[in-house]
């Protein structure tokens, strides 16, 4: 089975799509696919579908959705893949792929693949590469992880409480991987290559301090000190206006470092404990900033 959730929902068995078009069965499949090889309780599925106000027929209706999914899986299993020998291994049935358990249902991934799990594997390996000072390897791994995203998580799925929470978790992981990939690229001296990307990102994430700090560094190291200081002032204005907050001490320190540096001199690497802490930078938000 192949599961893609980081964009449009696409679940394939034997190379054939088993994703239904109806919204609620599609929700059920998305939640089961996200937790593939783990039991999803009936209560969680009902909460996802009906947001705390299920009809009396909720369990029966959920069973109907599961039967519809099994019908699609059975059709996919009936398709013989090209090049398969006439004496294939024992066939699985739809009930072997979408399993009923005493407490819920489980979608069996088996030896298949999931883009969510591949993203988490690649990004985790990339973070460890940064910890070990392998910035080139980290940049490559995190680029591969980010390339798995083709849109927002569950982009074409109607989301209830469960999927909405998981979508936010995945998007935060995406932003974290992006932040750390940029960090690795800065360490490799790719500041000029990052300018266009950071222009877009700081506009999209208008209160994200770490992205703004990275933009300030990239501009300053490209000999554009005035623009780097403008980025700080725009961010400060947004934080004060929208959140009632001043920039963090670390960002103010970066601003002062740029302000006092000679325009033609790249900002020196700052080796403060806060700046060197990779885990702190992975939390996102306005206080998760690295300035080295």
Image (spheres, helix red, strand yellow):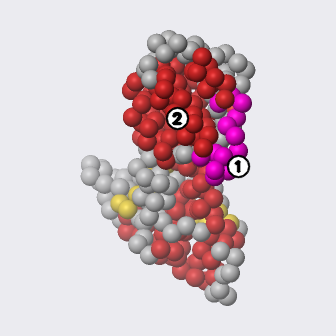
Q: Nearer the viewer, residue 260 or 187?
A: 260
The answer to whether residue 176 is seen in the rendering is no
The answer to whether residue 209 is seen in the rendering is yes
Q: Residue furthest bottom?
A: 56
Q: Residues within 10 Å of mark 1 (few under 14, many from 20)?
A: few
Q: Nearer the viewer, residue 161 or 24?
A: 161
Q: Which mark is residue 231?
A: 2
243 drawn magenta: yes
Q: Quadrant of residue 10?
A: bottom left
189 drawn magenta: no
Position of residue 178 in the picture relative to residue 278 (left or right): left
Q: Which mark is residue 244?
A: 1
**Do tag 1 and tag 2 residues touch (Cβ < 8 Å)?**
no
Q: Nearer the viewer, residue 11 or 21?
A: 21
Does the magenta stretch mainly form a helix, a strand or a loop? helix
Q: Give me the C-alpha separation between circle 1 and circle 2.
A: 18 Å
Q: Residues within 10 Å of mark 2 (few under 14, many from 20)?
A: many
Position of residue 68 in the picture relative to residue 42 (left or right): left
- Look at 30% across and 50% down and name the residue there: 85
The stretch in magenta equals 238-251
Q: Nearer the viewer, residue 164 or 236?
A: 236
């Amino acid at each position: 089975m192949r599961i893609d959730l980081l964009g449009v929902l696409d679940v394939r068995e034997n190379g054939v799509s088993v994703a239904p078009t109806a919204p609620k069965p599609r929700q059920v499949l998305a939640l089961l696919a996200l937790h593939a090889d783990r039991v999803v309780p009936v209560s969680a599925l009902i909460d996802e579908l009906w947001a705390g106000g299920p009809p009396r027929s909720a369990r029966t209706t959920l069973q109907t959705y599961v039967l519809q999914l099994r019908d699609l899986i059975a059709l996919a299993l009936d398709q013989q893949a090209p090049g398969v020998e006439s004496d294939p291994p024992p066939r699985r049935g739809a009930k072997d792929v979408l399993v009923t358990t005493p407490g819920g249902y489980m979608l069996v991934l088996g030896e298949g693949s999931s883009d969510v799990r591949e993203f988490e594997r690649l990004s985790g390996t990339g973070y460890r590469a940064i910890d070990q000072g392998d910035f080139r390897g980290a940049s490559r791994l995190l680029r591969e992880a980010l390339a798995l995203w083709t849109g927002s998580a569950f982009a074409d799925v109607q989301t209830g409480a469960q999927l909405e929470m998981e979508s936010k978790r995945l998007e935060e992981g995406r932003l974290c991987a992006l932040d750390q990939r940029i960090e690795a690229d800065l360490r490799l001296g790719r500041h000029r290559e990052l300018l266009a990307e950071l222009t877009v990102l700081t506009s999209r994430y208008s209160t994200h301090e770490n992205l703004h700090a990275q933009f300030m560094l990239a501009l300053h190291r490209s000999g554009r000190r005035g623009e780097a200081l403008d980025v700080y002032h725009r961010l400060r204005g947004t934080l004060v206006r929208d959140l009632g907050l001043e920039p963090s001490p670390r960002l103010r320190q970066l601003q002062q470092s740029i302000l006092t540096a000679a325009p033609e001199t790249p900002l020196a690497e700052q080796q403060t404990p806060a700046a060197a802490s990779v885990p702190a930078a992975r939390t996102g938000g306005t206080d998760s900033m690295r300035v080295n």
